[in-house]
Amino acid sequence: MKSDSSVRRETPLKGRRIVMGVCSSIAVYKAADIVSALRKLGADVTVIMTANARKLISERIFQTLSRNKVYCDMWCEIDSWKPEHISLAESAELLLVAPATANMIGNFACGLAPDMLSSVYMATKAKVLIAPAMNGVMYESAAVSENIEKLAARGVKFVGPDSGELACGSVQKGRLACVGEIISAVQEILK
Ligand SMILES: Cc1cc2nc3c(=O)[nH]c(=O)nc-3n(C[C@H](O)[C@H](O)[C@H](O)COP(=O)(O)O)c2cc1C
């Protein structure tokens, strides 16, 4: 069997700059597979985690898989004069948010920017792809439905959610779209 370094891979996303927001959905563990798949396709992925996402999963996973620094806090000491959320916003070709919580979708729709990810969203001219994941009743709620409609009308793209058994035990629409579906949506947007 060949060693990993000798495996030739297709890299259709070579050098493409993707900033990926990771929110505190129970589906957060699937974000690791998404980062890994994007990097293997050649993308340069930088992850932003919300403070609550860090309560569910370690930033070290994303640092290792993306091979880049993981951004979490807007208020930590930095070396550059430029605020990091602005540098990230300007550098992105695509802002992918997977999984996206009801809370973060609400921030985006209402123009609220209390943290790094929502500030990057507000400051970027990049294309935006959102993969929601939440309980089905949350997803069907008037607030979430209206926020998604609002964002879609502004040109934001969505992938999923899928229907199926959720972590909360019910069978509803709210599951994070599968990794392959999210990668295809990214490729479609960046092609
Ligand atoms: C174990 C656990 C799982 C959660 N899963 C989800 C989820 O799938 N989708 C969602 O919108 N919120 C979920 N929440 C609630 C969010 O974490 C909460 O709304 C939080 O304030 C969102 O913060 P963030 O958007 O900054 O990550 C979950 C909370 C917990 C404790």
Image (spheres, helix red, strand yellow):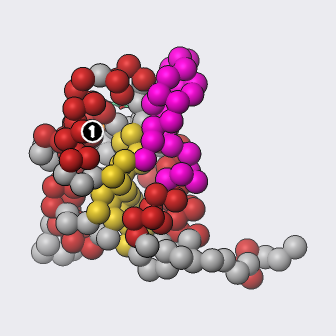
Q: Furthest-front residue in view? A: 153
The residue closer to the viewer here, 119 or 64, is 119
Residue 145 versus residue 92: which sits nearer the camera?
A: 145
Measured from the top left, where is residue 40 in percent x and y?
58, 70
Q: Residue furthest right?
A: 1
Image quadrant occupied by the N terminus: bottom right
Image quadrant assignment for residue 190: bottom left
In the rendering, at what x and y percent does residue 121 appear? 22, 55
Magenta region includes residue 166: yes
Query: Which amino acid, mark 1?
Result: Ile
Can you say whether 4 is above or below 178 in the image?
Answer: below
**Does 15 sit left or right of 109 as displayed?**
right
x 42%, y 24%: residue? 135
Please name the residue shown 30% across and 33% down the image. Answer: 102
Q: Quadrant of residue 19?
A: bottom left
Q: Residue 167: where, in percent of width, then height?
A: 53, 25
- Give percent across and percent down for residue 187: 47, 66
Of the 4 image quadrants, the one containing the C terminus is: bottom left
Which residue lies under the disc numbered 1? 148
Task: Give the magenta part as a residue range.
Answer: 159-182
Q: Secondary structure at mark 1?
A: helix
Q: Residues within 10 Å of mark 1 (few under 14, many from 20)?
A: many
146 sits left or right of 181 in the view: left
Is residue 56 visible to the viewer in this orientation of the structure? Answer: no
Q: Residue shown at 47%/28% (left/top)?
A: 173
Q: Could you tell me if residue 102 is visible in this image?
A: yes
- The image quadrant in which ligand 1 is located: top left
x 27%, y 52%: residue:
156
Q: Nearer the viewer, residue 106 or 85?
A: 106
- Above or below for 166 versus 68: above
Q: In the drawing, does residue 4 fall left or right of residue 119? A: right
